[in-house]
Image (cartoon, coloured by chain):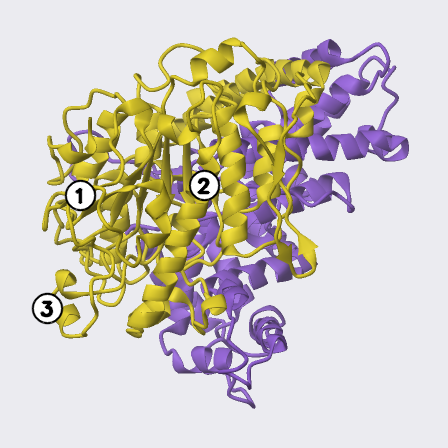
């Protein structure tokens, strides 16, 4: 069960509450290997990490509810109306939990809003409930329980709601938008063709560019550029701007060959043999290696040997696509390895 | 909120830093505590435990192996004499005023599984044994990627969760604090970021800025009682959400939600608890070099202990295999590379500087308690690194220091030497000094029932 990465958390809050949110001091993402998404599925939050989620939640709530226009736009109804509180909590809950609230959850939060409202401020209870829902593990964790796969009794299939969450995490580094949740409500995201249409729509969204950039930045460990320091007396040719140039170069290259698809990832020809370019050109294992890395990242865990069998098909589709990265993402999203998970063998049965 | 502005004595740590100033009020313990309160009476008798960690071991010498012997490097760590009141070596000189105990010659005794390969790597084996008494977990270990996790809690968490340490009486606001200074990292992931673990894949990342630590200890929220009560009530609903979720999960995920639940409950307890029980120091600055930030952070940690906000902490001066650039010492490259490149003199200078930092850290615990004794007399602070030396990554001669009096259980200023001795003896000595009645410590071949008897009274 992955947790939202910090990027996903911040993107989610920005989408829900608009720009201009305070800078969040969250417990830094970490991971045992390669990607934050993998760390988010294995590591436990520390005491300080839970506190930081709480403080962030209160900061957001305070900011939004301190501005009457912003607050009213968020709530979308007059709080004196009999069903306003319940309607708002249900609507916000669907975005935060990436599924409809259960009747018990809805009642829990509506009751809390009533109990926590002060006589001086009729919105005070709702403000706290927003802060509370932002601390709920149902928001912070990406709950994936699955359902029986009608096509394969040995596997569990992710539900449409869970697929909406998986797609938005992979392709946008965020939570699903209303359109994707509506599709989940219609149970469309377990259907090949309709799933493909949604993936293609999501890849055209600017959020996909950021997400792809983030994948390559982690895959190539570009964060290490932050620590590049040299003594100017010993390295007179080194200028601090060089680090930013290296970062920009990497970003433009990824945009060129992975996002805008003007080039191929295999055997890409560069006019100037830059450092990153050399890595990409000279590493003949790159396409195969990248498929594996993306597969780990998309599933938020290191995939076992048996699970990696699905990679043969992905690598083939990648090659057939002319090594276009977006085609790889589509193939991945449609692959059984992303949409289903093997059930553990029954007791006494040899794997 | 107790706000007794009756501090007649304040000292301020000041250092000119790039035209600015670091300033932290340093109230004496006597003035900070409500006079004659239960806190003042009780807390003086309760021991505290801390871990101080520095990166990249020691300068190499013959004790680390044959190749190191051939390099010509001398042993500038091991004192010439054993026993009480040893004469400090070059690297221990900065600590002389604190009379720390030093155990030399110790090394990990844990087994080294053959698969996956690479588990003998000094970095990864060394810091796991030094901090947890166990080897790294084999599952998921990848030498080439430097991916690893701990098998069990680090010693600070072992103590903090030990049933005899906090007991069943009222617990401090924080079970433990995790603090650090240098932000340079060998890798940005996993255990290269932290020295405090709750168990596998469960890190307690250190707070790296004085203001972060200050806000956590003395944050403004604690001044509004009504707000705290409403937040505590709100957490009932969050906790119910978490319990609902837990019921639907498999075992591994249940453990993660359990940890989350535990932290939520602790946060709720803090909200419901009494407000601050001592006067707050003033808010520090985040600027400063490694030594200056160490002083400021140490003062905050010592204040937290003095105010009984916690009795367990860890302090990561530099992270495992640190790439910190000590350019103030004329070292142009990151420390890890400097070790690998075999620059013995530079490593010596860096480690002397790190010992100066440890001395600064201990200075903060020199404050005087209401009973007239130094705070450090209540404590046991265990200092260690990740291996013996960083040139060849030998785990021989893994350094171990114990500072403090542990309420009279620890002698001070003692050097003992046991070449090849089990490193976990120092762990068991610390646990014994804290009165935890453990008869053995160490795991997977690293078990020992022996303490370093010369350190204990």
Pick the front one: B333 or A256: B333
The picture quadrant where one finds residue B154 is top left
The residue at the far bottom in this view is A271
> From the viewer's perspective, is the residue at label 2 or at label 3 nearer?
2
Quadrant (top left, top right, bottom left, bottom right) of the C terminus of chain A: top left
Q: CA distance from mark 3 to mark 1?
A: 21 Å
Q: Does dot 1 land on a helix, a strand or a loop?
A: loop
Q: CA distance from mark 1 to mark 2?
A: 27 Å
Q: Which residue is mark 3?
A: B66
Q: What is the x, y in percent for residue B17? A: 63, 58
Residue at coordinates 60% horizontally, 68% vertically from top-left? A259
- Which chain is mark 2 on? B
Between disc 1 and disc 2, whose residue precedes? Answer: 2
State whether residue B230 is above or below residue A214. above
Q: Decide if residue A116 is in sight here.
A: yes
The picture quadrant where one finds residue A22 is top right
Colour yellow belongs to chain? B
Residue at coordinates 56% horizontally, 36% vertically from top-left? A161
Q: Which residue is mark 2?
A: B363
> From the viewer's perspective, is the residue at label 1 or at label 2 nearer?
2
Pick the front one: A18 or B128: B128
Between disc 3 and disc 1, whose residue precedes? Answer: 3
- The colour one sees for chain A in the rendered image is purple
> Neighbour class for label 1 at 10 Å: few (<14), some, many (≥20)?
many
Q: What is the x, y in percent for residue B303? A: 53, 30
Q: CA distance from mark 2 to mark 3?
A: 38 Å
Pick the front one: B260 or A109: B260
Residue at coordinates 68% horizontally, 40% vertically from top-left? A13
Q: Does dot 3 land on a helix, a strand or a loop?
A: helix
Between disc 2 and disc 3, whose residue precedes? Answer: 3
Disc number for residue B423:
1
């Amino acid at each position: 069960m992955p947790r939202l990465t910090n990027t996903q958390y911040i993107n989610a809050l920005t989408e829900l509450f608009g720009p201009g949110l305070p800078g969040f001091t969250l417990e830094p993402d970490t991971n045992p290997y390669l990607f934050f998404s993998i760390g988010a599925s294995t590591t436990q939050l520390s005491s300080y990490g839970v506190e930081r989620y709480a403080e962030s939640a209160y900061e957001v709530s305070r900011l939004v509810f301190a501005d009457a226009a912003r607050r009213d736009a968020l709530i979308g109804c007059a709080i004196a109306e009999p069903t306003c509180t319940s309607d708002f909590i249900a609507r916000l809950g669907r975005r935060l939990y990436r599924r409809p609230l259960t009747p018990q959850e809805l009642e829990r939060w509506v009751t809390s809003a009533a109990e926590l409202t002060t006589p001086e401020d009729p919105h005070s209870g709702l403000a706290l409930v927003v802060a509370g829902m932002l601390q709920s593990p149902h928001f912070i964790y990406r709950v994936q329980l699955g359902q029986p796969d009608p096509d394969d009794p040995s596997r569990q299939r992710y539900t449409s709601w869970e697929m909406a969450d998986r797609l938005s995490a992979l392709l946008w580094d965020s939570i699903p938008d209303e359109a994707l949740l509506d599709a989940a409500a219609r149970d469309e995201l377990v259907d090949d063709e309709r799933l493909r249409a949604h993936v293609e729509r999501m890849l055209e969204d600017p959020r996909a560019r950021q997400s792809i950039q983030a994948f390559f930045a982690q895959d190539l460990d570009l964060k290490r550029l932050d620590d590049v320091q040299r003594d100017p007396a010993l390295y007179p040719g080194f200028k601090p701007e060089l680090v930013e140039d290296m970062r920009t170069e990497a970003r433009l290259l990824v945009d060129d060959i992975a996002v805008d698809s003007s080039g191929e990832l295999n055997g890409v020809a560069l006019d100037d043999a830059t450092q990153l370019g050399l890595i990409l050109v000279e590493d003949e294992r790159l396409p195969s290696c990248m498929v594996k890395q993306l597969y780990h990242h998309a599933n938020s865990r290191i995939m076992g040997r048996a699970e990696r069998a699905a990679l043969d098909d992905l690598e083939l589709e990648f090659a057939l696509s002319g090594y276009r990265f977006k085609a790889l993402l589509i193939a991945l999203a449609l692959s059984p390895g992303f949409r289903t998970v093997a059930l553990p063998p029954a007791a006494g049965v040899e794997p | 909120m107790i706000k007794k502005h009756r501090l007649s004595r304040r000292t301020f740590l000041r250092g000119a830093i790039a035209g600015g100033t670091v300033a932290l009020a340093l109230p004496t313990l006597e003035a900070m505590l409500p006079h004659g309160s239960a806190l003042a009476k009780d807390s003086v008798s309760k021991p505290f435990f801390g871990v101080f960690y520095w990166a990249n071991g020691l300068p190499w010498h013959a004790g680390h192996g044959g190749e190191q012997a051939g390099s010509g490097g001398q042993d500038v760590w091991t004192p010439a004499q054993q026993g009480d009141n040893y004469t400090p070596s070059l690297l221990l000189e900065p600590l002389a005023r604190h009379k720390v105990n030093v155990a030399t010659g110790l090394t990990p005794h844990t087994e080294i599984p053959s698969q996956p390969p690479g588990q003998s790597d000094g970095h990864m084996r060394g810091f796991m044994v030094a901090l947890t008494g166990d080897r790294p977990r084999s599952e998921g270990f990848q030498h080439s990627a430097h991916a690893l996790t701990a098998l069990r809690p680090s010693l600070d968490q072992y103590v903090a969760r030990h049933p005899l340490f906090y007991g069943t009486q009222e617990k401090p606001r924080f079970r433990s604090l995790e603090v650090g200074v240098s932000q340079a990292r060998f890798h940005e992931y996993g255990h290269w970021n932290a020295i405090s673990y709750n168990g596998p894949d469960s890190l307690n990342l250190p707070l790296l800025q004085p203001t972060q630590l200050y806000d956590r200890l003395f944050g403004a929220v604690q001044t509004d009682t009504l707000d705290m009560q409403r937040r505590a009530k709100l957490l009932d609903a969050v906790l119910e959400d978490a319990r609902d979720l837990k019921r639907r999960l498999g075992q591994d995920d249940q453990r993660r939600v359990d940890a989350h639940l535990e932290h939520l409950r602790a946060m709720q307890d803090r909200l419901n608890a009494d407000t601050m029980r001592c006067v707050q120091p003033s808010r520090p600055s985040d600027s400063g070099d490694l030594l200056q930030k160490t002083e400021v952070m140490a003062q905050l940690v010592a204040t937290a202990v003095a105010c009984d906000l916690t009795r367990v902490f860890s302090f990561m001066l530099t992270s495992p295999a640190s790439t910190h650039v000590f350019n103030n010492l004329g070292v142009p490259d990151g420390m890890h590379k400097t070790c690998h490149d075999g620059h013995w003199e530079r490593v010596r200078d860096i480690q002397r500087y790190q010992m100066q930092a440890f001395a600064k850290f201990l200075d903060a615990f020199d404050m005087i308690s209401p009973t007239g004794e130094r705070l450090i007399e209540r404590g046991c602070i265990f200092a260690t690194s990740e291996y013996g030396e960083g040139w060849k990554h030998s785990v021989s001669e893994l350094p171990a220091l114990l500072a403090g009096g542990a309420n009279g259980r620890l002698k001070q200023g003692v050097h003992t030497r046991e070449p090849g001795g089990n490193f976990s003896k120092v762990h068991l000595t610390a646990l014994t000094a804290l009165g935890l009645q453990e008869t053995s410590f160490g795991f997977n071949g690293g078990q020992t029932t022996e303490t370093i008897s010369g350190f204990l009274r």
